[in-house]
Amino acid sequence: MRKGFLIASSMEERLDTTGGRKGRITIHDVAAAAGISISTASKALNDTGRMGPETRERVKRIAAEIGYRPNALARGLLSKRSFTIGLLTNDTYGRFTLPVMAGISDALVDHGVSVFLCAIEEDPALGQIHVEAMLDKQVDGIIATGKRLDRRLPVDLSNLNVPVVYAFTEGAPGTVTFRSDDAQGARLAIEWLVKLGRKRIAHVTGPENFFSVRERADAYRKVAGEERPVLFGAWSESWGHEAVARMWSGNGEKPDGIFCGNDQIARGVIDALRERGIRVPQDVSVVGFDNWEIVAAQTRPPLTTVDMELKELGRQAGLTVLALAEGRPVEPGIRKLPCRLVVRQSCGGDTLGI
Amino acid sequence: MRKGFLIASSMEERLDTTGGRKGRITIHDVAAAAGISISTASKALNDTGRMGPETRERVKRIAAEIGYRPNALARGLLSKRSFTIGLLTNDTYGRFTLPVMAGISDALVDHGVSVFLCAIEEDPALGQIHVEAMLDKQVDGIIATGKRLDRRLPVDLSNLNVPVVYAFTEGAPGTVTFRSDDAQGARLAIEWLVKLGRKRIAHVTGPENFFSVRERADAYRKVAGEERPVLFGAWSESWGHEAVARMWSGNGEKPDGIFCGNDQIARGVIDALRERGIRVPQDVSVVGFDNWEIVAAQTRPPLTTVDMELKELGRQAGLTVLALAEGRPVEPGIRKLPCRLVVRQSCGGDTLGI
DNA sequence: GATAGATGAGAAAACCTTTTCTCACTTGAC
DNA sequence: GTCAAGTGAGAAAAGGTTTTCTCATCTATC
């Protein structure tokens, strides 16, 4: 190998980039440059202790000039706070985790807190490794998140001596859990269909063993009528196709509004309706669930759907774990966050002036 | 607020969970329990220094018994290694970042390295904040990743005095950059179509100002013939529809094989063909690009497509940044990783015994 | 002009590890 | 019986920061 073409991040190499300095700039350098002791420098920079205002300003100015940044490791060692939290997830596809993550990061970046992302799949051993690595690194707290409200992560987070907050996954009793209000979200969808004048509303949704499926179905029956049909199936487009085939094959009444359990099913339903020459939204209105942009926006017509506000959920989870880390009291329990209806064109109504 | 229902992670509260201990278990506790000095304890646990093998074993056993885990902050302060790296991305949707992330984490978790995920959108100020936060936390290295090969992240990573590796985004000269070999991927697709006996192959792809679009188009022309048509457009399903409409509207020859620039376009193309009564794969074979499971697998028929092996790309990027962090020499330059053809049913061939 | 109080700033300990240096003791050889 | 070499283990420093405690100086009061 030609030596000239190698990168090495050895100390000799770094000398060039840092202008001859040996390592990082420490508070010792600040103190030396200002001609004071390190304790005074520290107090000046942290706005603590007693000292003349002109000294304080001068130290701050010098610190800024030479580009001093405190070493978070040293600080954390003393303060027992690392300004770091861990995000544990089993949602490898990221459809639910990413918005949650974005919200957490968004809420915490101003507080100087960084986030470790740990994807643990369904592997308890991997989960254990990640949890231990995080604890070794003295995380101030952990947020556990998943892809399903009624499942736990395959890892034990009790007795951890750092605070744990659950987001979009089932939490342990006595802890804080954030989840979407699926019943309210379902009502939002149904009431929208009703408001648009739809009378024969059907519900095509996912597997009945999902908690959120049952909760949405219950809310649907309460608003649309207990006798209305609910079709349970898979979370897939092809189930949407099949459900339409089933509803339109018999002699029974044909729905004029369909509330779907997620956007993929809705997409399948809409495609199937079009293939049968049924117009959406003129003949039938369709509502989805999830507001998964990539599906909802590319559907023809674009999908009116329920957004679970996962980013907001992440934001609140982040602020809560921060509060716990700082010792502020937090009431345990399940917090249901309201969903929001995103109106596009699959129901009509956007052009009806409603 | 009812006091009994509050969570507080105060010290008093923690006492219960940790069995009366004041804080974390430190090496002092190990030394005390073993009746030795902390230096001996340290040397025993790290397999360094001189001591009797029975002492070493005894210390290890006691440490395990009382659940000692070394404080990574203290260790990092001394060793100047935090066993932490930062992942910077502007791909908020996560389609490209998540597989890369999974690969990085996968490669590094065995080495005890954790990953900070920093989503910076296109905001330079946010990027700067995240970079500074990471540097304060003494990350051993940074991996920059994006959603486009020919764009840089909106943040300056030169002169950082920690190693930087680029993955799926344009890197600075003199650094290591990992990217997919799009030309090879395109050849894989075209050659597969040719092998299946397709003679009139078209290429429907994304915007021409994307580097990877041009690279794939060039490779396509080299294999399929310089005169073959290339249709540039958007990265969307609707462009797939439109492209089919355009090709089938005129009197010109109709393709019997279509190589699409991504899976969404392919999905649009297939849907459009079906709407025209053209059978896939019997009449026309379609290949996609990206192997985006959620699209590729739900397409009817399921999509044969090119996988960029982003997880492997992430793995290599992770190992490389680790090597640099440890001072091992690494040759700079662009590393193109080969793509892989994933055969499903949209081309035929899987049932032709090829 | 002496003393109490206020004010500015530094010394040192603490956080938890790792590493180097030193010391005491044992063993073998002469 | 002395000396060299080898062996086991502890003391202390280092890493960068914050915090508490102490000290010295200055101002105001009687």
Image: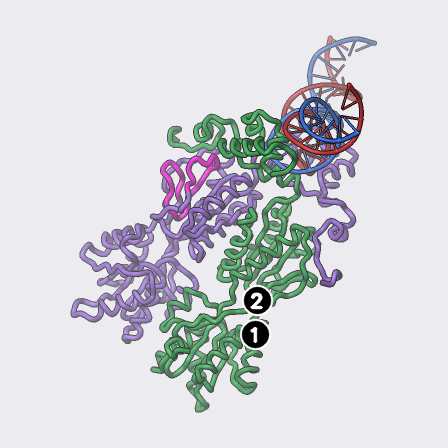
Chain colours: A purple, B green, C blue, D red
Q: Chain of mark 1?
A: B
Q: Position of residue A24 (x, y in %)?
A: 71, 44
Q: Disc 1 on helix, strand or loop?
A: helix
Corner quadrant of residue B158 = bottom right
Tell me the crowding category of disc 2: few under 14, some 14 to 19, or many 20 or more residues within 10 angstroms, Cα based.
some
* Chain at tag 2: B
**Res. A187 visible in picture:** no
What segment carries the magenta color?
A156-177
**What's the residue at 52%, 57% (across, down)?**
B103
Task: Give residue B337's mark.
Answer: 2
Residue located 29% across and 59% down the image: A205
Quarter of image, res A229: bottom left
Where does label 1 land, which residue? B183
| Residue A102 inside the magenta-drawn segment | no
In the image, B227: left or right of A35? left
Q: Nearer the viewer, mark 1 or mark 2?
A: 2
